[in-house]
Each structure stands twice: as structure tokens, then as C-alpha cells.
Amino acid sequence: MTSRRSTAVLRGLGSLAVAALLLIGVPIGLATLVGWPLPTTIPDSDTLSTAINTGITDTFIVNALAVVAWIAWAQLALAFLIEATAAFKGRQPRDLPIAPGLQAAAARLVAGIVMLVAPLQPARAVAAPPSPPPAVATVESAAVAAPPSIAAPVIDLRAQLACDTPSWPTTEPAPALVAAPTRTVSVERHDTYWAIAERELDDGLRWQEIRALNVGRTMVDGHVLTAADESLRSGWVLDLPAEEPTVTSPEPVASEVVVVDGDNLWDMSEDRLAVDLERPPTDPEVEPYWIDVMDANRDRLVDPANPSLIHPGQVLVLPPTGHEPAPPPPPPADPVEPESPQPEPAPESEAEAPPPATEPAPTTTTTIVPTTTAPTSTVESLPQHEKAEPTADDQPETATGSDSELGWWLAFGGLSSVALAVGAKRHIQRRRREFALEHDGADLPAPVPDQRQVHQTVVAMADEDLIAELQYALGELSVDFADSGVPCRPRLVRHSADSLEVLLDQPATVIPDGWRAEGDGLVLTLEHDINLNVDLDGPSCPAPLMVTIGQPDEGAHLYLDLEVEGVLALEGDVEAARRLARSILTELALTPLADSNRVITIGDLVDPEAAGLPQLTHKETWHDFADDLTAWATGSHSALTLNDWPNAFVGRGHDPNHDALMPMVVVATKPPPPELLDLLVDSQPSAVAVVVADAFEGALTTIHCDAEEICLDDLDVSFTPQQVDATALEDMGRLFNIPDPDDDPGDGVGEDHREGFDLDGPASEPPTSAEPDAETEEAAEVAEETVEPPGPPTYEILVRLLGEIRVEGAEKTMHAKATSVTAYLALNRTVTSDALEEAVWFGASGSSNRKRLLETMTRCRDAIGSQHLPPNERGSYTIGPGVRTDVEIFEWHVAQVQRQEPADAIESYRSALDLVTGRPFSYTNTGRASFGWVDFEHQATTWEGRIAGVAKAFTELCLDNDQPDVAIATLRRLIQAAPLNGGVVAALMRVHIATGDRSAADHLYQEHAAALDQADLGDP
């Protein structure tokens, strides 16, 4: 008896024992221990009164439970009888209106008992069966398919299982264009109709089609789907709607199989499904096909009433399973070669005929002899007299032909990380929402066909609940450690659907409730259920730099917290180390385990195509980022020291929204300079981590990388690596980019908003010759040498307020919220968290926007650097001296006038007015929700009046010094930038009138009146 037969017998014996216990043992036990549970007489009034006064007795409770047990037993017995009858007759059992689960349990018991009886039947059916003659199946391999009338070939299933590449011969008529058949999908854990529609059909709105297609179908556990069913159970198989017509072959015909000693219909059905599915099938998958096999062989059975009675040598039919491999595409037609001058062109008939020296192609003959041992097969293949046309697989990969390779990476490489898949899915959805908000009324661009498969894979791999459970458990642990004063934190986490194990950086002296400790408190195992419906009273992202680094076993993910490691070196195979580094930066740029990370890459690890990844900043050298990195490492370390927090994990348990604990990770190809490395090591612990894909002295942790395995040296832990190559990273970046139909970022940030104003032309400069300029420059140099007055404010970042609000000098595009935060801070220099939140989210509901403020501050620091936006201390934000506003420079130039000669004073006025690029403190309509503080503080009208006053003083000074042309040129440019400023218009009209050009003044007035009328602002 084979191991499979032994397993079937053992399962059958177990099912028989359980059935006997439930159907016979339960009633005997109830009758013996309880007896008759119902009252034998009708109670009188005295008995009822006594029962009311004394309460319910123990005997009554026992009898009531016995009645419930009898009812359940009766339903189970009825279900067992129905299932057994259906199995004996080979029919589909009908559903019974009984308690849920009882009929499914009865069906499993009956299936197990049938598996026990089936292998024992053939041995006693026929004693010494005669050996049947060999059956020969001939399949013609020719250009024309065999006619449907040819009998199905006889196949020994044992031979097919012995082959590495089994095939099931079928007749293959010419393919035809037909409607695509419905596909099926297996319901997974936590699946919904919406999730399946989004994953399989790339459109969650089609969930109703799936439900309508499956209403009335019976699932594997006997449940019949109705339109009211919203929840799905794992293991159900649902039909999916067809999408488009496809070229397909007719349904495969049934194949015949020869029974050998020890066969039974269940095992034969299971073997056939295993061949087509290319994996062992489950019992719910085997059961419906087993019934189909019995129905297909009614006329071939010795006893149709007993389908389990078969004998060796018997030929049975195996109907199609519905899981057959897709048929090969039809051979392409011979290409028609273009006519070319040849000496003697062959006739068409000769061109189509094979060369005379080649004999007619023989047929392929497969001879299969049914026997108890493995049969032999003789196959004669067609001789190849000419080279076959290259297939798609043989073609060289093109720029657009990397879909399959990318899909492979998504399924088995980068997106084997559930965290990366969830983060990617969320970012795609976020980008689409942002596009809809920024382009009111614009249709979302159609997805690029090359990225469609990538998006589907992302959705399929994203297990939101699994990540939510991990976040919740870590958040609980963070609060527990903070409350108990435990100074440790998770270093390595192994997480799967059914377990969560945490390796701490040091043993825990106090074990939190719901966790089991091992290894003197160094390893914690979660032992309580996570209820995601209960709000977590703690940080939602306590370990934002926790990243997937590999898979220790199938179905589990291994996470490493980079904050613990501080400075990490990836050594060994260089390319393997770089792939792991790319995986780390990709996941952390998208991670759902953090609200927002700052991810910086230094060196040539990524290409510009990866710029679509959020929070990813590229620097060429360590020097380009040293100031920013130093500021944040020292700032976060100081915050931990000031609050007496042992690490950032515990700190977030105390204060989940502490600004100084926002995470930063640097992923580089080369180590940092020695002095910077020393500072990073001395600043531990902090909210900063550094990963270098190279070996170097001074690393706090080292991971040895090979192509197939990586190892944490100090823990002696090895596992399959998580890797991403450069091409896959570029494709991920392209996936997140949504093309802008009008190249408008939507918030008025990152552009030159002075379009239409010729700031460098004659209108911007007074019509003077080069000699006065040279004299002025020389005089300025002399004055500088003698007096040495302080110069205008210097800056690295300039915030433009005298026009449309924007930030100049930022390394990344800043959208409305980040621009508003930076502008408000630059204008006020120091602002409390509450005041900043109220200003930027002006008029918002009473709910707190502190979490959004933290995310926005991270984006601001990503754009202008932490050295300009240090961590929040004592509830207030400050901005560094390297950030200035044009308002400050404007006021500095105006202030210089009081101690300057007229010529210099005119130049100072002009320099101040040249800073005006539009209506002051203006913003786009799409950014209005971010700049409520501008209107509340009347910034625009205040500065319009201020500019008008300076323009008037400038005009009078020019007229007094006989320089009207200078005033006209400057004021014209100013009006072009801000045409609605009445004070500036009045100043220019004053110059025209003073110079006798009344018509120019009238024309200017008419233009101003028209501009006011167009803006619906009334008469001037």
C-alpha cells in the first residue's frame, strides 16, 4: 500500500471513528448521564410558584442543555444521512435548513469514509483479472487538426504522473474567435467583492458584476450565495466576468485512463487535478470533480449503484477538470516574402511543397501499454527540415518588453514584502486623489498599458489587515515600555498571518501583558488577539524605520529596525548589497509603518526615473547633505536626552507626535566622511539611520550579503534576501507618476510666476547710458571701502511674498501646505505649534491637525533641509537664519534711504520696488485652503498700501532730482506686475503730468479703470 493509500485509509478510519462517536456515542451518553430531559407531567400551580420563588435549579439547566444537544444531534444525523445517500448515488446533496456548519461537517465525514471504502473495493471485485491487450493511441501531427470523430486516446495516469511534463492528448480543431470564458478566483483571507474586483479586474466598481455572476452558486462548503451575502469565506471559488473576446480552442474532450491495482475514483480524480493544477489539490477542489468522474462513468461501472467498485484493467473516462493548461497559440502563417528579382522563380505549387529530397513527415505515434508497472512510451518526433520561426520568447527584450520581468520581481522579489505592496497601493491612491483635487474637472489619465500588470500585482500583494495588525501590536508595545520604564525596543521582528515574534535590543525586565517572554526576556511572542476595531491609545507608527530585509520561511516576513542599528554596513557581494539597499530605500519611501519618512540616497544607487517615489531625495555626495544630516541627528538626540527617553521607540510611546522624532534614513553607496561618521555614532540614539552598501570601519552593525542569502553577523541569522534591482526601481517610480495634462502643478509652486513681465528688458532699467552705471558702481565701491555699511540680508532660501507666494532655493517642489508653513514661519520667525496649525488649517473643524502638521514639516525639511527647520522645542517652531523673505529685503532697502544721498536713495527705492512681482501675498485658487492666514491678517491689502507709499516717495524723489525717466521705467514694470494697485497708478500719472504728457496719464487711467472693471472691483 502506497503512502497516499495509507493516508486515505487513516483519514477514513478517523472519519469513521468520529462519525460513530457523534452518531452513536452522543445519544448513548445523553441517555445514560441525563436520561429523559423533558418533564413527564404537566406542572401544577404549586410547582410553578415554588420554581419562581426558588429560582432555576441545576437539574433544569442540565436538562435544557441536554435538549439542545439532542436537537443538534438530530440535525447532524439527518445531514449525515443526506450526504451519505448522495455519495452512494453519486448526486449533489441538497441543502438542509439546519444549524450552520453541521451539513459541512457531515459532508467531510462522509468523504473520509468513502476514501476508506474506495481503495478496499477493487481487491475483492474480481479475483485474478485477465490482462487486457495493449491499447494503442495514435495522434496525427499534421497541419490539419484531426477530425472530432477520432476516439479519445487511452492514457495510463501513472505514466503521466511519472513524467515531468505530462500532457493530455486531445483533438484540436482550428481555433476560433469566441467570447472569453469566465475565469475563477479563490477567495483569500479578508477578501471582499471590492478587493477581488480591484485585484482581478483592476476596477473595484465592478464588484457587483462578480456578485451577480455568482448568486445561486453552491460553494465548496455547501453554502448557496445570495444577493444579500456581503461577506466571503476563505476557500470559496468565484466566477469572474469575461473581459474581451479571445482566440481559444474548444473545450478539451474527456480522456480515458486504465485502472491499475489499488486505484479508486477519489485518488484518480485527485491525481488528474494535481497534473492540471501543477500542485496537490485540496479536498474542496477534489470533491466536485470526483462527482463529475462518477457521473461520467455510470455506463462503464460494474455496479452503477456503487461507483466505488472498479477493477484493474477497466477503462474509465476522466472528464476535463477546467484547469487544463492553456492551449498553444496557432502556428503563424508562413510569411509572404516580397517579390524580388530572381533568376528562376519557383512555381507557387513547388514553393509550397517540401524539398524533393525530404521524405514525407511521419506521424507521431505514442504507444502506452496498461500494466501494473510503469508503462513504456515510444515517441517519434517530426524531423525538422527548416528552422522554426522565432517565437516571442526568443525575441530580444525591448524597452517595452519588460512587463513579465517586472511582474516576476513584484511577485517574488520586491513586492514579496507586504509592507512595500501596501505602501505602493496607498501611494497610487493618494496620487490619484491629489490629481483630482489639483485638476478640478479633468479626467484621470488612462493607465499606461505597461504598468497595468504592475498595478494589479501591487493590489494583489497588499494585505492591509496584516500591516495594520503589526502596527497595532508595535504601538501597544511602545506604550507598555514607556509606562513600565523598560529601556529596550524591537530590533528584529518575524511576522506572519498567525504569529508575531519580536527580538529586542536588550532583555526586557518587565514583560507586557499579552506577550510571552523567552531567552530571559530577549524574545517576546504575541499571545493575544489584535482587535483593529478598538482605537489604539498610543503611536500608530512607533517604528517608522522598520523595513523588510528578507523571508526566514514561506509566508513570514523579517523586519529590521534601522533606528536600532544606527549605522549599518551591507558587505559581501556588491550587487547583492546594492539590491538590498534599493529594497530598503524603496520600502521606506512608501512604507505604511510611518506617516512620513525622509529618505535620502547618496551616490549612484538610483536613477532619476525613481524620482516618482515619495519622500525620496537624491544627493550626489555626503558634503551636499552634511549640514542637514548633522542638524537632525543632533536635534533628535538632544530631544531624547532632554526628555530622558532611552530611545525613539519609547519616546513615541510617551509622545506619539513629537516633532524631533520624525525619522530620517540615508542610503548610500559609499561611507560618510570620518568626522561625519563620528558625529553620527556619538549622536546615538536618535531618529536617524544610515545604510551603506559597502564595507567600512566604524559601522555599528554589519549584514553579509550574497545573491541567495544574507546574514546578520552578530546574531548568526540567515535568510532569503529582499532585493530590488535598478530597472525595477525605475519602473516603480514611473508607476507613481501621473502625467499632468497642462503641466500645472496646481498649487502655484515651483514656477516662475513673472511670465509676461520683461523684468530684464528696458522697462526694468532706467534709460541711462553705461557711463553713469560705471560711475555709480565705482562710487559704491569707494563708499563701501570707506563706510562699510551692512549689506542686505543674505539667504540660502528666499520666500517670495511680494507676489505669488513661493519658495526659491528649495530642492523639491513644495505644494500649497508646505509652502504656506514655510512662508508663515519665515514671516514670523518663531511660532507655537498651535498657532501654526491654526494659521495653515485656518477655519478647519475642531479636530486636531497635529499629525498633518508633522507630515507637512517633514516635507518642508525634505525640500529646504533640517538645518533651516530645526526640531520643535518646548512647543514652538523656529526657522533658521538661512531662510529670508523678500519683505525683509524690501524693508532693508527702504531703510537705507534715510542715510543716503539722493542718487543712492533713488537706487535703493528702485531695488525695493523691483522685488514686487505681482499682487503681494497672492496664491492660486486651488491653494486657498492653505493660506487662510493671509486673508485673516489682511496681508495683501496692508502690503499694497505699503508698496504704494514707497512708490509715491520714489516718484517725488525722482522728480525732485530731475530723473522722471527712471520713475517711469520702474513704475511701468510695477504696474505690469500689479495692475490693480491704485497708489502705483497715481504715482505714474503724477510723473506723466509733471512731464507734460497728459495723454499718457489719461490713457493710463483708462487702462486702470478697465482692469478694475474686469476684476469687478468698481471704479478707481
Image (spheres, grey):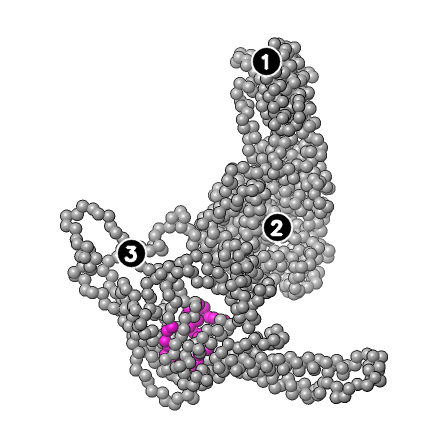
Per the image, label 2 sits on a secondary structure element best described as loop
Q: Within the magenta stretch, is there residue 261?
A: yes
The disc at residue 594 is: 2
Query: Which residue is nearer to you in this view: 265 or 604?
Result: 265
Dot 3 surroundings within 10 Å: few (below 14), some, or many (20 or more)? few
Give amino acid for label 1. Answer: Ser
Query: In the picture shown, does residue 895 fall above or below 585?
Result: above
Tag in front: 1 or 3: 1
Distance between the Cα atoms at labels 3 and 2?
Answer: 56 Å
Q: Give whichever of discs 3 and 2 has the lower sequence position.
A: 3
Give amino acid for label 3. Answer: Ala
Residue on which disc 1 sits: 999
Measuring 69% from the left and 59% from the top, which residue is drawn there? Answer: 534
What's the magenta region?
A: 254-282
Measuring 70% from the left and 40% from the top, which residue is drawn there? Answer: 842
Residue on which disc 3 sits: 333
Q: Position of residue 159 (x, y in %)?
A: 36, 74
Q: Can residue 507 be seen in this view?
A: no
